[in-house]
Amino acid sequence: MAAPTRDGELRRTFPAFPPRPASGAGSAGTWWGDAWVTALEEGALDAARLARGRRYAERGHVDAITVTPGLVLAYVQGSRPRPYRVQVRLRTFADAEWERFLDAAADRPGHIAALLDKEMPQSLADCGAPLLPGPGDLDPRCSCPDSGHPCKHAAALCYQTARLLDADPFVLLLLRGRGERDVIDALSRLSAARTARAARDGEPEPLPGVRAGEAVAPRTLPPLPAPLPPPPHPEQPPAYPAAPGGPDPFALDQLATDAAARAHALLTTGRDPVGRLTLWQDAVRLAAARPGSGLTAATRALYSSLARATGRTTAELARAVAAWRQGGPAGLEVLEDPWDPPAGRFDRARPLLLAADLPAFRPWHNHLTHPRGHLQLRLGRDHLWYAYESEPGQDDWWPRGTPDPDPVGALTGLDGPDTP
């Protein structure tokens, strides 16, 4: 499973799982993942919808999955071009339930070690708090017209969520309301407090009260309380219903999520991370932020809308996205703006390439092109070298690899850079 991104302690986004061959094995590999699948299947009203949902999951129809307290959210590609917005809700713990769970987890040192190893001890499932869902606890919702409980799109999301739980049981704790760091910190404090209490056993308790001199000493009023802290993460936007002639709900969801992230950054840092971007740069940024690889139907629709709004083609946008993912705004500038670098770093690059047993690259502005015409290096204004590849003689250059201050290093990992 690819590593998730963290938009905050209480929001984790996992890239889409790739398709996998269908098998007779279950959808989960751990006892807690099996418990999640059991809660889904025993609460379902139609086994046929579950079977279709399992096939959807196996074929990779579930896009990136976002997990927040009480909510799993993803877009699922159905039979129509536009994907459906699917949510699965699970009740979060009350404070008293969290206290019971944390007390049980801190009661044995092995519990904390198991959690850190991404294992869920079975004894924690019966600690007085219903950690694992039971039949009827999962509340699936989907924007499709199917009124089944669950529909095949929600079933697909539930099966993929079981795979997330297999890899990291802290996903289940996040669904119940607390992030991994919060849980680990609370367990550390409980363990330290219990150790300190054990060390104090037998010592007399200090007498209550304060010294008389302290009681009558002049005092200054305490300072005013600090302003309330900003929220730890942007909130999840609501589901936007589709209406004939109305705006695209998928596009609204994309824009609302991005606006919330920008507003949160402005509130916490005082700076707008994209305020200085042009319309074209901002469109490339939005397209590049789309998780996953490959162009799904939803991604193609997004690319088409952004390209049309900026007067570009989808092919130009796709190439610009590759440059943005390679080097951000600097990578996009390298793609689109040739320039004449001053003497120095650019002139020293060709001898360095020759010393690495590479052929003589042809210079043009800030470009150095392999004589076969399949590899190219471009020097950015940030003094980094950016590698490009093309079919020989096609002049169809695409960004590849990672920018590097060394021209030979920028070619590392590309196919056949030392081909004469």
Image (cartoon, rainbow, N blue to C red):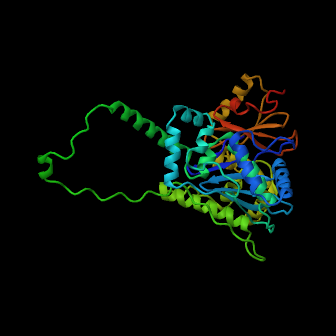
- Residue at 11% across, 47% down: 213
The answer to which quarter of the image holds residue 394 is top right
x and y percentages locating residue 202 in the rendered image? 30, 31
Q: Is residue 5 above or below residue 402?
A: below
x and y percentages locating residue 222 in the rendered image? 25, 56
Q: Is residue 382 above or below residue 317?
A: above
Q: Is residue 356 left or right of residue 21?
A: left
- Residue at 74% across, 75% down: 246
Depth check: give the residue in front, 412 or 49. Answer: 49
Q: Is residue 13 left or right of residue 373?
A: left
- Residue at 82% across, 55% down: 50
Q: Is residue 283 above or below residue 189?
A: below
The answer to which quarter of the image holds residue 205 is top left
| Most distant residue in the bottom direction | 245
Counting labels gives 0
Q: Quadrant of the C terminus?
A: top right
x and y percentages locating residue 248 in the rendered image? 74, 69
Q: Is residue 401 left or right of residue 91?
A: right
Residue 89 visible in image = yes
Depth check: give the residue in front, 201 or 58. Answer: 201
Depth check: give the residue in front, 118 or 64. Answer: 118
Q: Quadrant of the N terminus?
A: top right
Depth check: give the residue in front, 202 or 356. Answer: 202
x and y percentages locating residue 297 in the rendered image? 82, 58
Residue 334 visible in image = no
